[in-house]
Amino acid sequence: MTALAAVSPLLPRAARAALPEASSAERVRFKLRPFDLAAIRLQPGPVLEALETNRRYLMGLDPDRLLHMFRVTAGLPSHAEPLGGWEAPDNELRGHFSGHYLSACALLAAQTGDSGVRERGVHLAAELAKCQDAIGTGYLSAFPVDLFDRLRAGQPAWAPFYTLHKIMAGLFDTATLSADRGSLDTLARMAAWVERWVEPLDAQEMARVLEREYGGMNEVLYNLSAYTGQARWAALAQRFNKERVFAPLAAGRDELQGLHVNTTIPQVIGAARGYELGGSAQLHDAATFFWHTVAERRCYCTGGTSNGESWNTPPGILAHELSGYTEESCVTYNLQKLTRHLYAWTGDARLGDYYERAFYNGILGVQHPADGDKLYYLPLAGGYWKLFGTPLHDFWCCTGSMAEAFAKLGDSIYFHDDTDLYVNLFVPSELTWAERGVRVTLDTRFPEEETLRISVHAPEPKRLALKIRVPWWTAGAGAELNGQPLAVSASPGGYLRVERTWHANDALTVRLPMRLHAAPMPDDPSIKALMYGPLVLAARLGKEGLTPENVRAPPTRPRRIPEYTAEAVPVAPLTVRSQDPESFLRPVDGRPLEFRTRGQQEDLTLIPLNRLFDERYAVYFKVIET
Ligand SMILES: [Zn+2]
């Protein structure tokens, strides 16, 4: 383990040797540590296919088009055709996607070892540095600095620091994951520009600036501080800590009603990172309370939250929060990031449960398998469909967040402490734990099957404890070693621990029995979704009224969200004799993870929500017992 790893356990450290050593130390003791993406290779299956779809999407984009408005802003020649949607020349968020793109390339290169993807990101970063040089102040953006003048003056400006954060985070990822020294220099110059911009503002003026969405400015500056050992960046990060939001959270009060969700979560990720560096109890308590109130009282069964991008109700009130605009994808992505911090602090398996819920239901199904386009909202009111955009004419915030999410699908499968290996997600993969000199393979078709086959490979017999998360949805988890039942047991919410000296050809088999179950709304149990294991099921409602023109959102004009151009269809209640879904749903022979209702006026077929595309569906039903 390198010195840097001790400093920044939550940051990947691929090839960090090329970069300066950090000198600051984190104040927090981590219970678990994640592995670098580079230590994990996905094995064939739907998750790897999704990653490959994203790779084709990313590599299909033209860097000169991504750079166009940066070059124009810097006064450099550019003859590329401008992009559309939120990257269009008249959009105030332009440039945000290039930041995400840098992150996505760096993550994907680490996840796969693909040097072409790495080079794409490093090339883009180098071209951005030329734009920064041409401007000469450290400022780097695809829009002129006037937007920041307007922000300072309290005049309308969409979200300049939000966009800047994406670019800074992209440079940070390129510096750390792709070991690109130039990106670190570009980032430091941007940070110095921000420092000068912020410096004259008093606390009141800064509080007003922070009322505009600013992404995770605090997070990226804390990261830069941890990475370079320079305290000035942590001091600057603190200026982006939003007291108005953090104070009630730290006091255990949910005052989130009325807030814009994806404005808030990245701020709290910054709080979590600030706690790791400085040990502040307030930041710790704010992040911890926030996670629990959001994940446990404000999320749908999918692990997503937000309706019309906001929290509109007190906690636990969700039954009337179903629409075509639920669950912004950025939100799920950012809540997963926050979860990963808290999971590392605590090792609490319930956090792993949340991560899995969001992974299968909020992430995997929001990329179109045909072209890698990404979803903005995941509609949870019945009768809608997944409204993907038009490639090259959307570039919504979620297009960017999901380009990152699908670049690192191997993340958070494994964690470790000083002695034990934790298996958190059941995705076919291979882990190389270099410090321990072992390679671990996880072979499974989960969730199509409920069996995991885990092998530990080492040059000689190796003592090692495996801790497999026992998910909330299973009952009676069991294990066999080389065909013999093991006397181990664990309940949902805990870990199944197998410690032994592993020999070549030892095969551990873990069974996590799955069943059908219901996910009722907290404030109206008669409204419920149906689940199988970790999977939210969606009833297929056909394509009636959907045409090539309205199944996808038309090219998005500046500042516009995707809008449905056809109506939702009504969804009939389910009438049942017993609330137990096993009594009114049965599996379809020969079609894994497919179910059919029985006893309804019109019976329905249900499949995992993450496999349903270009078709109307229903997730939540009114269920009437007769
Ligand atoms: Zn978004």
Image (cartoon, rainbow, N blue to C red):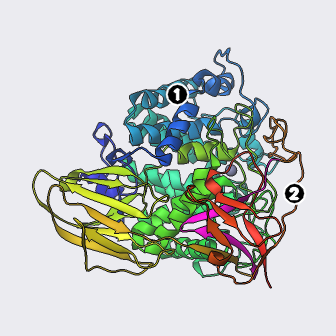
Vertical position of residue 551 compared to residue 253: above or below: above
Q: How far apart are marks 1 and 2 (CA)?
A: 45 Å
Q: Name the residue under label 2.
A: 569
Q: Decide whether residue 345 is among the magenta residues.
A: no
Q: Which residue is drawn at 25% across and 80% down?
A: 487
Q: Which of 333 and 360 is in front in this view?
A: 360
**464 sits left or right of 254 in the view:** left
Q: Nearer the viewer, residue 336 or 370?
A: 370
Q: Where is residue 600 in the image (x, y as percent from the top left)?
A: 79, 70
Q: Decide whether residue 532 is among the magenta residues.
A: yes
Report the number of discs: 2
Q: Name the residue under label 1.
A: 124
Q: What residue type is labelled 2?
A: Val
Quadrant housing residue 168: top right
Q: Residue at x 36, y 80 (%)?
A: 490
Query: Which structural element holds mark 1?
Result: helix
Q: Which of 152 and 285 is in front in this view?
A: 285
Q: In this picture, which residue range is highlighted in magenta? A: 525-543
- If you read the primary sequence from the N terminus, does the residue marked by circle 1 or circle 2 appear first? 1
Q: Where is residue 281 in the image (x, y as percent from the top left)?
A: 48, 76
Q: Which of 304 and 479 is in front in this view?
A: 479
Q: What residue type is labelled 1?
A: Leu
The chief SS type of the magenta part is strand
Q: Which residue is drawn at 42% across and 65% down?
A: 276
Badge 1 density bin: few <14, some 14–19, many ≥20, Cα 10 Å: many
**106 sits left or right of 583 in the view:** left
Q: Residue furthest left?
A: 460
Quadrant of the image for the C terminus? bottom right
**390 sits left or right of 424 in the view:** right
Query: Which structural element holds mark 2?
Result: loop
